[in-house]
Image (spheres, grey):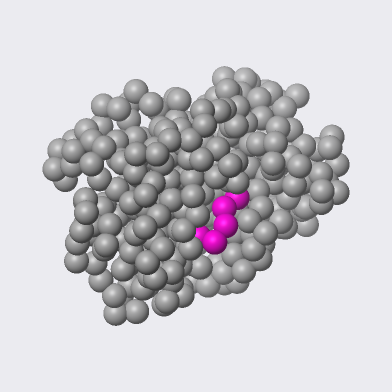
Amino acid sequence: MKTVVTVVGARPQFIKVAPVSRALRLTGGVNEVLVHTGQHFDFNMSDVFFAELEIDPPDHLLQVGGGGHGAMTGSMMQKLEPLLQELAPDAVLVYGDTNSTLAGALVAAKLHVPVVHVEAGLRSFNRAMPEEINRLMTDHLASILFTSTDVATENLMREGISRESVHQVGDVMFDSALLFAERAKARNALLVELALEPGRFVLATVHRAENTDDPERLRALVGGLEQVAAELPVILPLHPRTRNALARAGLSFERVRTVEPLGYLDMVALESQAAAIATDSGGVQKEAFFYRVPCVTLRDETEWVELVELGWNRLAPPRDGGVAEAVLSAIGTQGTDAAPYGSGNAAGAIAEVLAG
């Protein structure tokens, strides 16, 4: 039986690992060892996802959380290297574009263990984003690359990645959306608690360093969301990075209603009932599309360009006046119906390739 070590550490990765781990168990022939770096470590950012998405507890918890990019990635590598030497896996599986992704890929490659990258080929073409560096390096270290869309596959071809290494399987987040849809629909307690009327509120998320670490962009975001909140309720699950950045900048929300970070099911319950979603998260952009809710991306660019082309997403870089106008004008709009992320069996396709 083959052994695959899966390295995860951040909230978006837990959503992706749930259907893939399940598919690996059903397929057989692969023994998965789950390693959690600890990049996201508190209950609302980690534990609740394992519980709600029925993910087995990690086999190894490295407890590396906080710190700058270099310190965090280096600490993860220090702890991963002896562990991978001990486990001697047939492959190391990583997801997305976090520091945990890069640390797993670098250590595996240096130990001559094949790297498998799920959600390969995404590009913002903005190297000021740490996530872009992580994606690029991981893709060029990987032996097997699983892409979600035609655009992602084309990006890899342009960069000279061997076509034989690339498997376009669809999006595992779509798998999760289908897998847990009924359970999420039943989660209306939060809407009742927050006194929200379906279709009469905006859901917002802000966490990317390009927004939180730039005082001018952060000020424009706060001002824009406050303007929207004067028209209808705005709910903002507050990421720890954003909370700290607001404090450093001396900024606060008055009309916007902030709540603690939410588990997957509560988040989906809000996403699916919102009038519009404003976010700088790649995953939330896709989830908005899954539930056919108009989305405004609070960035200069997006990796999910197909959602802009289909009319479900629009870009609103955080500048004075632009955020509120984009969010309010998005409400009530619809894009073209399409299926750019596959049929919902990406995890099964990944499991078959790894088992074979």
| Magenta residues (range) | 299-303
The part of the image, by quadrant, that contains residue 150 is top right
Task: Tell which of 252 and 217 is nearer to you.
Answer: 217
Q: x and y percent of residue 239 in the render?
A: 36, 59
- Would you say 124 lies left or right of 145 here? left
- Would you say 119 lies left or right of 55 here? right
- Would you say 51 lies left or right of 355 here? left
Name the residue located 71 percent from the left edge and 56 percent from the top edge.
Answer: 136
Q: x and y percent of residue 198 in the render?
A: 23, 35
Name the residue located 43 percent from the left edge and 45 percent from the top edge.
Answer: 295
Name the residue located 43 percent from the left edge and 35 percent from the top edge.
Answer: 334
Q: Is residue 1 above or below residue 47?
A: above
Task: Tell which of 140 and 225 is nearer to you.
Answer: 225
Q: Is residue 1 above or below residue 269?
A: above
Q: Main secondary structure of the magenta part?
A: loop
Task: Tell which of 254 and 108 is nearer to you.
Answer: 254
Asked whether 301 falls inside the magenta stretch, the response is: yes
Q: Residue 45: in sight, yes or no?
A: no
Asked whether 125 falls inside the magenta stretch, the response is: no
Name the residue located 39 percent from the left edge and 70 percent from the top edge.
Answer: 320
Q: Residue 356: in sight, yes or no?
A: yes
Q: Which quarter of the rendering shows the C terminus?
A: top right
Q: x and y percent of residue 83 in the render?
A: 63, 52
- Would you say 61 lies left or right of 270 here? right
The part of the image, by quadrant, that contains residue 309 is top right
Q: Is residue 282 above or below residue 350?
A: below
Q: x and y percent of residue 245 in the render?
A: 37, 72
